[in-house]
Image (tube, grey):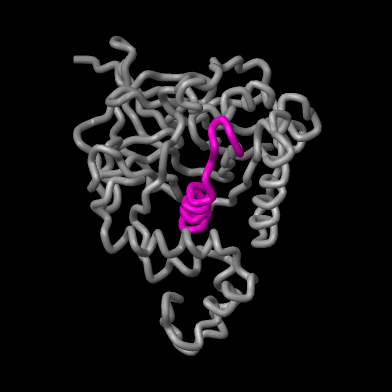
Amino acid sequence: MKFNFIYMKGVVIKSTGNLCQVLSGDKVFSCKIKGKTRLLNIEFTNPISVGDHVDFDYDEKNQLGLIECIHKRKNYIIRKSVNLSHKSQVIASNIDLALLIVTIDQPATSLTFIDRFLIQSEAYKIPAVLIFNKIDLHTKEQQKLLKKYRVIYENIGYKTLSSSIHQPKTIQTIQKLLDNKVSVLAGHSGVGKSSLINLIDKDLNLKTKDISSYHNQGVHTTTYTEMFSIKTGGYIIDTPGIKGLGLVDLDMHNLPGYFLEMTKYSVDCKFKNCMHINEPNCGVLSAVSNGLIASSRYKSYLSMLEENTNYRRNNY
């Protein structure tokens, strides 16, 4: 009996449950996952993710591939499932650059959300950039708030950009950042991720919608994470809107090291294992008191520590 199976390697560019699209060379193949796959010691709601490198057997007769192996991920971004507190979802994997799209209003992105995203990026060694979008819609008060936000994160060392549909130079800057990289765009629904991708590569023409005037929140136009090849070189991953990010698979003893500004002042702490909560002679607490560390960042740090001791809370 002759079998029409071809052994192939590829990258997952779209995943919809048990079915996914795999890019191998310049062709895309429909594939299914073999059995129940588990990675690390975490139960994922999605065993396979966009960005995963896979091996698969392709059945030419039925035009369907069977994924046999998922290669070890170099990094990933995950969020906790809202309905399943002990499970988590991989948003994307094997990322070279993470772009968080932030809006001051319509919808508002909180500093806590920004910090959670940056902590994940630091933990998994993914360079991150903050893009403050829709600045053409800002009031004078919102312009002041934008300046404050940018100062907080630029002082830490993060790159920030401001963008709108009327700023072609910013789009060119983003295009250069994405050059020959696998980059992921993340943010709340309605922050303009798909619109931004359309400006980066007009050939993609992704669907977009206005935000809900009733809830002042975005409407989901991207329902599944998907990777696209961009003509300037590289790949960009568009993700569904994220309401919140939980902390998963992070050792809380390492948390202070993911807050880059804390490492600078932790050398002044009396105790080597100082967690910067209420310990005497703490260099970080002193820096917070003196305005050298933003109070919003320290509040985010405390909230993450508190969540870890009570991780069954569903406020992600």
Question: In terms of depth relative to the viewer, which is nearer, 216 or 121?
Answer: 216
Q: Position of residue 37 (x, y in %)?
A: 24, 39
Q: Position of residue 165 (x, y in %)?
A: 72, 24
Q: Position of residue 9 (x, y in %)?
A: 42, 32
Question: In terms of depth relative to the viewer, which is nearer, 105 or 220?
Answer: 105
Q: Is residue 63 visible?
A: yes
In the image, residue 306 lies in the stretch drawn in magenta: no
Residue sitting at x 61%, y 39%: 104
In the image, residue 124 lies in the stretch drawn in magenta: yes
Question: In terms of depth relative to the viewer, which is nearer, 295 or 178?
Answer: 295
Residue 64, compared with residue 136, is above or below; it is above
Q: Is residue 22 left or right of 122 when viewed as pictured?
A: left
Q: Is residue 261 left or right of 5 when viewed as pictured?
A: right
Tell me the quarter of the image containing the N terminus. top left
Residue 133 image-quadrant placement: top right
Q: Is residue 24 visible?
A: no
Residue sitting at x 25%, y 17%: 3
Q: Is residue 163 left or right of 119 when viewed as pictured?
A: right
Residue 131 image-quadrant placement: top right
Residue sitting at x 51%, y 53%: 115
- Number of numbered discs visible in the structure rendering: 0
Question: In terms of depth relative to the viewer, which is nearer, 168 or 200?
Answer: 168
Q: Is residue 108 left or right of 201 when viewed as pictured?
A: left
Tell me the quarter of the image containing the C terminus. top left
Residue sitting at x 44%, y 66%: 255
Q: Position of residue 283 (x, y in %)?
A: 55, 81
Looking at the rendering, the stretch of residues picked out in magenta corresponds to: 104-125
